[in-house]
Image (tube, grey):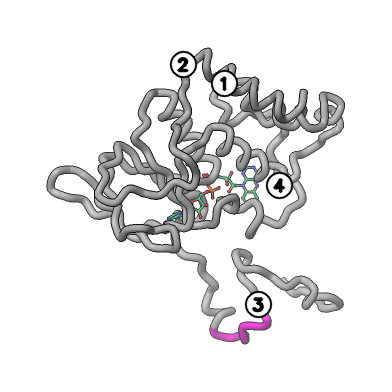
Amino acid sequence: MSLDALNKRVETDLSYLSFRKPTEAQPIIPKNGHLYDVIIVGGGQSGLGTAFGLLRERVSNILVIDENRSGLEGPWETYARMITLRTPKNLTSIDLGIPSLTFQAWWEAQFGSEGWEALDKIPRGDWMNYLRWYRSILNLPVANEIKLTLIEPTETGIHRLHIEGNGASCPTLMARKVILATGIQGGGEWHVPPMISEKLPLHLYSHTSQTIDFTGLKNKKLLF
Ligand SMILES: Cc1cc2nc3c(=O)[nH]c(=O)nc-3n(C[C@H](O)[C@H](O)[C@H](O)COP(=O)(O)OP(=O)(O)OC[C@H]3O[C@@H](n4cnc5c(N)ncnc54)[C@H](O)[C@@H]3O)c2cc1C
């Protein structure tokens, strides 16, 4: 089965469930002054899977925002540097029980069942490509380059989300419910302990979240 054939299969499977994809064309521009039923903060795998879950439940007045550029959500092609995922390849995830939406279906559409047998762990770039495909085939309403800075409760129980970034076409968004799918970055700001940041010049250390010039480390010793 080719990727085109798989895409058609997904469409067919979803039609059996009477699932209608949002028709709004990409890119998604947040609507100024609009009251969303749900805003999901974070367009990594949790945010995408949650958006699909809500759409399947016919909750369609939703928006996903992510601070990163499109296709660079989560750690996979930024600060994660391992070759493969640790997770075994056959653990299913955000397919929500639809076989044609699984990583295996996506992989086999390109490399066949022999390719699946030959695969050990999932290379992280391929996992990111799968997430890009998932978002695209489901036409999920994700708006990129929008960072949530504050959730302000209002007297009516509605949440006012303060946002910034290149994709923020307005300073605030309104939502009845807010789902935080902010991953590791949601735990707080990246941080370098003072014993390093106050003692070493910038060129002698890097935080794992930064772009690291590994060529500059050639022939150098790393001390832990
Ligand atoms: C090196 C490394 C290896 C890993 N290996 C595995 C593995 O093998 N298997 C596994 O299951 N997990 C692994 N993980 C964990 C991995 O982070 C999670 O499984 C996965 O990314 C969680 O998805 P998520 O959608 O919850 O969060 P993320 O993928 O982190 O997505 C959250 C998104 O929210 C965005 N965001 C955060 N705050 C805001 C804000 N204020 N405004 C707008 N956007 C915001 C973030 O930028 C990000 O794009 C690994 C993590 C790292 C760092």
Q: Earlier in the sequence, mark 1 or mark 3?
A: 1
Check disc 3 and give the amino acid type.
Tyr
* Residue behind label 3 places its C-beta within 8 angstroms of ligand 1: no
Q: Earlier in the sequence, mark 1 or mark 4?
A: 1
Farthest residue to the top: give it.
Answer: 16
Inter-mark Cα distance, 2 to 3: 53 Å
| Residue 216, image x, y percentages | 78, 78
Find numbered disc 3 in the image and state the secondary structure of the residue it sits on. Answer: loop
Disc 4 + disc 2, Cβ < 8 Å: no
Disc number at residue 122? none
Inter-mark Cα distance, 1 to 4: 22 Å
Q: Which residues are magenta?
A: 198-204
Q: Quadrant of residue 120?
A: top right
* Residue behind label 1 places its C-beta within 8 angstroms of ligand 1: no
Q: Which residue is mark 1?
A: 97
Disc number at residue 18? 2
Check disc 2 and give the amino acid type.
Ser
Query: Which of the two marks, 2 or 3, is nearer to us in this view?
Result: 2
Rendered view: 57 above or below 127: above
Q: Earlier in the sequence, mark 4 or mark 3?
A: 4
Q: Quadrant of the C terminus?
A: bottom right
Disc 1 + disc 3, Cβ < 8 Å: no
Check disc 4 and give the amino acid type.
Arg
Relative to 10, is 143 on the left or the right? Answer: left
Inter-mark Cα distance, 1 to 2: 15 Å
| Residue depicted at 54% across the width and 84% down the height | 198
Frontmost residue, 199 versus 35: 35
Q: Which residue is mark 4?
A: 124
Q: Is residue 32 magenta?
A: no
